Image (cartoon, grey):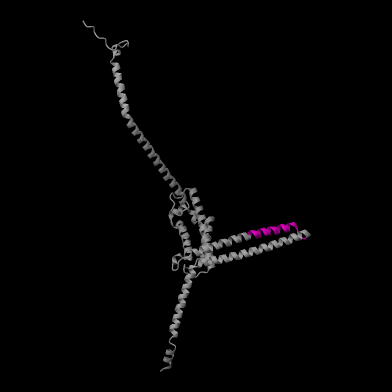
Amino acid sequence: MDPLWATIAEFWWIGPATIGTGTLGWLGLRRERRERRRRIELDAARLELRTAKRDAATARAAVRVARAELDRLQAERTTGRASAAEVAAARRELDRATDDVRVAAATARSRRAHVSAARAALPPAGDDAHLPLARVMGAHDEIIARWMTYETDPARLIAFPAMTDARQPATAAFLAADQVARQHRPASAHARVAPARFTAYRDAVAAAGRAFAVAEAEAWRQARAAGDAPARPQPGDPDAASTGAPVREQWTIIAQSLTQTALARGTEALARVVAARASPATRTTASSGTATGAGTASGPDADGDDGRHVWPVPGRPRA
């Protein structure tokens, strides 16, 4: 047998084994990346919690150092080697360090709550539409779309010139925040992103949203002052919530008016029914009075008598 074919017959299993190992490795790596994308928010929250715990430990150490420094200066104050100003400065430093400890402890509790929330909000496996990075990118796209309505809609472009004027402080702040968010934005929702970068992008998008809300409110305030604000704001506009209250009040007034009208008409109908039931007795009394009056008028007074009535009429004497 040819030595080449003998070698192939001896080591034929190496090729399939290599292919199988590579396939399994590729599948495992793909699953790991998908799981990392699904848990990126939880990993970022855990990273923030570790950072908050480290900051809290540093703040507690600073309190111990400040308290020891204050004790030293108070001891030296008794011997005259430290002034009252130095002791007061050390006490202020201790107070500041104590405040920092409170802030760090509160931040750690908040980060722990964020970890619990991120764990509860884990999307199901295979649901790429609800990945944490996709949600943040969707929120960023929504902010940009809302801002673009002021750029592309001619009516809004005329009514709200402040939204496209970078000289306005609020608009300039929004554009700067959006620029920071664009710098941290990944290429796609499936891109490989570290937890620190995800945190930076998420915070930048939140800051851009707050800046946009401030700029939009200022633009609407200027439009209302100039009389250019639309009478019917679209959903999501600053005046959309405020315009709903008068509409509800108008419907309340209409309902009250209808109720009062129904009550008034019911009262009138009841009065007509009562009047209809009392009308036969009234007609009987009126007819009796009329007959009595007629009889009196046909009596002796009608012939010019002096009012003396003779009753009964005397009979004639019989012959």
Residue 123 screen position, x and y as percent: 46, 65
Residue 296 screen position, x and y as percent: 30, 16
Residue furthest to the top: 319
Which of 289/33 is in front? Answer: 289
- How many marks on residues? 0
Residue at coordinates 48% horizontally, 68% vertically from top-left? 38
Which of 51/201 is in front? Answer: 51
Which of 111/93 is in front? Answer: 111
Image quarter of residue 80: bottom right
Q: Is residue 92 magenta?
A: yes
Residue 291 screen position, x and y as percent: 29, 21
Quarter of the N terminus within the rendering: bottom left
Q: Is residue 266 magenta?
A: no
Q: Is residue 175 visible to the viewer in this orientation of the structure?
A: no
Q: Is residue 150 above or below residue 252?
A: below
Q: Is residue 12 above or below residue 36?
A: below
Q: Is residue 277 visible to the viewer in this orientation of the structure?
A: yes
Which of 86/59 is in front? Answer: 59
Residue at coordinates 53% horizontally, 55% vertically from top-left? 170
In the rendered view, does 81 fall on the left or right side of 124? right
Residue furthest to the right: 79
Image quarter of residue 289: top left
Q: Which range of residues does the magenta coloring cover?
A: 81-99
